[in-house]
Every structure is written in structure tokens, then in C-alpha cells.
Image (cartoon, rainbow, N blue to C red):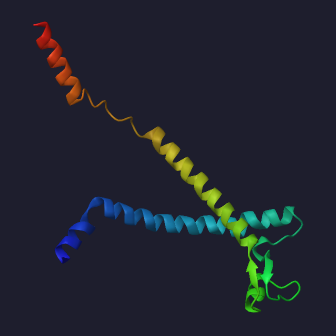
């Protein structure tokens, strides 16, 4: 079983996947920082100082008036943290757009696949037709 595991891990696809996951996680942190530290403060400035990270709606329980999201949760209130959701959606859109740009550029750089040539069915059809003629 150990040798099978070593063979599985040593396959190129698994290593490529592992590298991709690690790079993706690091890139996700960069996008989160961009959203939390650059974009959301600008949006807050434009909207008059609104801090989306502390926007929530209380569904059940009590939250002190003007309390932060963390304070409302600590008070035992059941809340819908819609501000955090807005931030997560913006994170996703930025990440999806950057991945789109990377894939688009990679498709431009990579050469198109070579023509595969005729299939077996095409060759057999040609042979059949040639035999019928001759």
C-alpha cells in the first residue's frame, strides 16, 4: 500500500495540483487583502464612511445598539452578516476576473493543437471506397 501511495504522489498531475493549490491559496490571500485593505475602504469613503465588515441584521436575540458584528455575536444574537457577504462577493469577482485574464493570456500564448489527421473510421471508409472503385 505504501508503494502505491508513493507512485500516486510521484505522478506529475498530483504534484501539479499540489503546486496549484498552494499558489491559489496564496493568491487568495492577496485578493482578500486587496479587497479588505484597498477596495472596501474606498467604497466606504465613497458611501460616506460605511464599514461593510460590520453591517448585519439581527434575526433573533438582542445586540447592543451600534454594536460591531463581533459584539453582536458575543451578545448571543443571531445575525445575518450581509456586509461580510458583500466583501466575499467582491473577493470572488476579483479572483474570477484575474483568473479569466490569466487563462485568456495563456490561450493566446499557447500554440493551437496540431491536426490529429484522419480517424480510423475515415481511413476505413477511404479503403472501402477505393476497393469498390478498383
Which residue is pictured at 56% across the width and 66% down the height? 28
User: Is residue 46 positioned above or below 113 on the image?
Assistant: below
Please state the horizontal and vertical placement of residue 87, each as a whole percent of the image: 70, 67
Along the viewing direction, whichever of 22 and 96 lies nearer the viewer:
96
* Occupied quadrant, residue 65: bottom right
Horizontally, residue 105 falls left or right of residue 20, namely right
Q: Tell which residue pokes out farthest to the top in this image.
A: 134
Horizontally, residue 54 falls left or right of residue 96, namely right
From the image, which quarter does the C terminus lie in? Answer: top left
* Occupied quadrant, residue 58: bottom right
Please state the horizontal and vertical placement of residue 14, each as a whole percent of the image: 32, 63
User: Is residue 72 positioned above or below 102 on the image?
Assistant: below
* Occupied quadrant, residue 3: bottom left
Please state the horizontal and vertical placement of residue 80, each as a whole percent of the image: 74, 76
Which residue is pictured at 22% across the width and 27% down the height? 121
Horizontally, residue 132 falls left or right of residue 31, namely left
Amino acid at each position: 500500500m505504501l508503494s502505491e501511495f508513493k507512485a500516486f504522489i510521484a505522478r506529475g498531475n498530483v504534484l501539479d495540483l499540489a503546486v496549484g493549490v498552494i499558489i491559489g491559496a496564496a493568491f487568495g490571500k492577496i485578493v482578500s487583502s486587496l479587497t479588505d485593505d484597498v477596495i472596501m475602504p474606498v467604497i466606504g469613503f465613497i458611501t460616506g464612511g460605511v464599514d461593510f465588515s460590520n453591517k448585519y441584521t439581527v434575526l433573533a436575540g438582542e445586540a447592543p445598539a451600534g454594536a460591531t458584528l463581533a459584539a453582536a455575536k458575543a451578545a448571543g444574537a443571531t445575525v445575518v452578516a450581509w456586509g461580510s457577504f458583500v466583501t466575499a462577493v467582491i473577493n470572488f469577482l476579483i479572483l474570477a476576473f484575474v483568473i479569466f485574464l490569466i487563462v485568456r493570456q495563456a490561450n493566446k500564448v499557447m500554440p493551437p493543437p496540431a491536426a490529429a489527421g484522419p480517424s480510423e473510421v475515415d481511413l476505413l471508409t477511404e479503403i472501402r471506397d477505393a476497393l469498390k472503385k478498383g
